[in-house]
Image (cartoon, grey):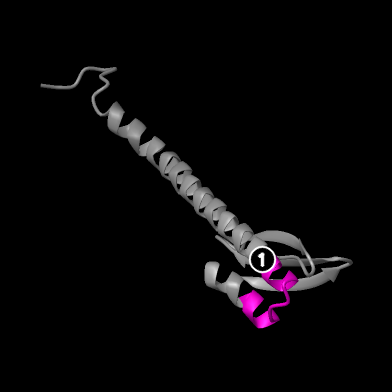
Amino acid sequence: MRPRLGDDRGSVVAEFAVAFPAIALVLVLGVGALAAAGRQVRLQDAVADAARLSARGESHERVRGTVAGAVAQATVDIQPRGDLVCVTASAPVLLGFTVTASGCALAGGL
C-alpha cells in the first residue's frame, strides 16, 4: 500500500519536533525567572534584617554574616546616611545577572 499524495501521517511528529525546543526554552526561562525572584525576595529580607542590626550597633561582620547566611555569594555594603544606616547587597543569579536589594534603618533605633 502506497501513501497517497497529501497524506498527513507523521505531521504531528514533525510539528512536535519543531515546537518542542520553543516550549522547553519557555519552561527553562520561567523556572529561571522564578528562581531569580525567590533570590531577590530572600536578599531583600536579609538586607532589611541587616539594616536593623547595623542600626542597633552590631558589628559589620555580624551584619554581613546575616546577609551571607540567607543568600550565598552576596556582597554587602554598609553606609551611614545622616540618621540612617543603609545596607545594600548584591548577589549573582543566572547567566551573570545579579539582583540587588537595599534597606535602611534609623540609627540607634530598637
Q: Is residue 5 left or right of residue 51?
A: left
Q: Nearer the viewer, residue 78 or 107?
A: 107
Measuring from the top left, give residue 39's x and y in whole percent.
55, 58
The N terminus - image quarter: top left
When asked about the image quadrant of residue 56, the answer is bottom right
Q: Which residues are magenta?
A: 51-64
When the figure is inspected, residue 40 is found, relative to residue 67, above or below; the finding is: above
Measuring from the top left, give residue 70's x and y in whole percent.
54, 67
Q: Nearer the viewer, residue 80 or 5?
A: 80
Residue ID at (53%, 49%) = 33
Extreme residue toward the left, this view: 1
Residue 108 seen from this side: yes
Q: Nearer the viewer, residue 60 or 57?
A: 57
Residue ID at (57%, 61%) = 93
Q: Is residue 91 magenta?
A: no
When the figure is inspected, residue 36 is found, relative to residue 50, above or below; the finding is: above
Q: Nearer the viewer, residue 41 or 104?
A: 104
Say what amino acid the circle numbered 1 marks: Ser
Q: Main secondary structure of the magenta part?
A: helix
Q: Residues within 10 Å of mark 1 (few under 14, many from 20)?
A: many
When asked about the image quadrant of residue 87, the answer is bottom right
When asked about the image quadrant of residue 13, the answer is top left
Residue 73 seen from this side: no
When the figure is inspected, residue 34 is found, relative to residue 58, above or below; the finding is: above
Measuring from the top left, give residue 79's x and y in whole percent.
80, 71
| Residue holding disc 1 | 90
The C terminus - image quarter: bottom right
